[in-house]
Amino acid sequence: MGQTAMAIGFGDNPFWTFSLAIYAGDGVAQSCIALQDRHDVDVNLLLFCTWIGASGRGTLTAADFAVILDAAGPWNREVVCRLRAARRWMKNAGDGVDPSLADALRRMIVDIEVDCEHAEQLALANLVQRPPAERPAEERVEAAIGNLAGYFERTGVMIRDADVGDLAAIVGAAIPELDGGLLGGKLARLAGQGRAP
């Protein structure tokens, strides 16, 4: 994820602004990619679940998840994931196209991939329109963790001990005023919950 110079008029969006800010945080990009690679989850949905809770917008309901997963799933699967797979393949392919040409094309795909993620994030933000609210940090953390746990449960992913540190990096960047030890303890309770893939 990163800012792109494409000439698309996306406009301002608080979810995209939030995502850019926390994705640049210490260890967040690595944690998002680790969770994505380990469980085949959608990073945009990880960030969305976190943003809804961290911004005081509360906890996502079963009805919210039904709409979100139905709307975001096909776009992420058929567009974002296919672009990512092509980009990764091009990076590791050793023959065929001239390496410098392949690298230049791969960098162009990165920009298109980011724009497609941006489009997905705008769609997500439009699906659950709630105003932000001033809430205590602990309440916002509970909502963010609950949203992430709900996403994992609905996608059949069991949260494991290895995931706790990655989730803590994401939620901690979104709500830095909460003590890291307390955050880790709250997330550790989720390990082993959900269904095995």
Image (spheres, rainbow, N blue to C red):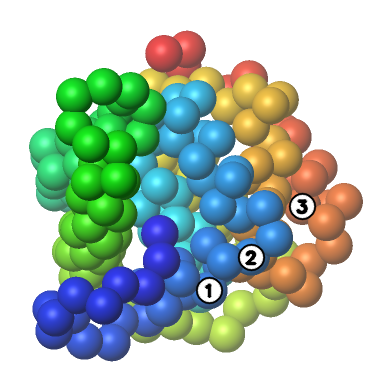
Nearer to me, 39 or 30: 30
Q: Identify the element where label 2 is drawn.
A: loop
Q: Is residue 66 left or right of residue 171?
A: left
Q: Residues within 10 Å of mark 1 (few under 14, many from 20)?
A: few
Question: Disc 3 or disc 2, which is closer to the eye?
Answer: 2
Q: Which mark is residue 25?
A: 2
Of 130 and 1, which appears nearest the observer? 1
Residue 10 picture location, percent across and down: 18, 80
| Marks 3 and 1, how far apart at CA | 20 Å
State the residue in front, 131 or 74: 74
| Badge 3 or badge 1: first in the primary sequence | 1
Label 1 sits on residue: 21
Q: How many marks?
A: 3
Residue 192 percent location from the top left of the image: 63, 20
At a point 45% along the width and 57% down the height, the residue shown is 47
Which amino acid type corresponds to the residue marked 2 in the rendered image? Gly
Q: Which residue is mark 3?
A: 183
Q: Kindly identify the amino acid type of the residue bearing the numbered disc 3.
A: Leu
Q: Mark 3: give few (<14), some (14-19) or many (20+) Cα within 10 Å.
A: many
> Dot 1 lies on which element?
helix
Say which quarter of the image contains residue 16: bottom left
User: 61 left or right of 168?
Assistant: left
Q: Amino acid at mark 1?
A: Ala
- Distance Cα–Cα, label 3 vs label 2: 17 Å
